[in-house]
Amino acid sequence: MDINEIIKMVKSLGFPPGSYAVFGSGPMAAHGIRETKDIDLIMTQELWDKLKSAGWEEKFLDNSSLYLVKNHVEAYRDWNCGSYKPEITKLITEAEMIDGVPFVQLEEVLMWKKAQAREKDKKDVELIEKYLKKENFKLKLFPYNKKFPAIFQKQKEKRQCQGLAVKE
């Protein structure tokens, strides 16, 4: 799935703002690093309970953590792995909004993937670190991007007209 597919699918769920955020490989897809096969969502206990009552299928991870599944969407109420134990509400409130959909910050995804340390995660760590180095380099080269965001409004409008996702 690419960013546009993720955004379309997440918006179709109609979840209330501030109750969830896209995690897993979704933020990687949002930044064009690589596509993802499914959508992992972290969410508040309240939203989790509603989905469970609505009949989302219950499944267990290898570590016995319970999660919910419907179609290509997986719902989690925690995202703990080893020493990485983030506060879900903080991840949600600090999420990066892209076309009205909250995505967990890429730096958090990096920490989680390092903690997971599976073979696929090690590859993703390399991809994310390479991407972040490139983005930091761009910011050093073009610091006016942060000072004068209105300059880039025409580019944003052009992307919206083409039906492409635009970072807010």
Image: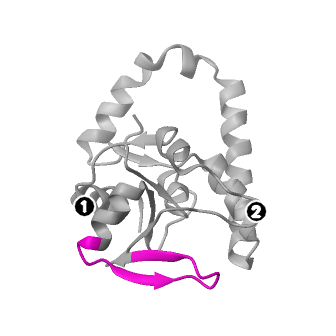
Q: Residue at x 49, y 14 (%)?
A: 148
Give, as a three-letter code, the residue at label 2.
Answer: Lys
- Residue occupying the point 72% across, 34% down: 137
The answer to whether 73 appears left or right of 162 in the picture is right
Instruction: Characterize the local packing of mark 2: few (<14), some (14-19) or many (20 or more) Cα atoms within 10 angstroms.
Output: some
Magenta-colored stretch includes residue 119: no
In front of the other: 10 or 60 = 60
Magenta stretch bounds: 53-68
User: In the image, what residue occupies the spot 45% across and 84% down?
Assistant: 59
* Residue 4 seen in this snapshot: no
60 left or right of 136 in image: left
Q: Pointer 1: what residue?
A: 13
How far across and down, in percent of the image, does residue 56 sit? 30, 77
Location of the N terminus by quadrant is bottom left
Near mark 1 (Cα within 10 A), the count class, few <14, some 14-19 or many ≥20, is few
SS at badge 1 = helix
11 in relation to 81, above or below: above
Secondary structure category for the residue under label 2: helix
Instruction: Compute the Cα span from label 2 to label 1.
Output: 30 Å
Q: In the figure, residue 141 lies in which quadrant? A: top right
Residue 28 percent location from the top left of the image: 55, 57
Could you say which disc has been placed on residue 114 in the image? 2
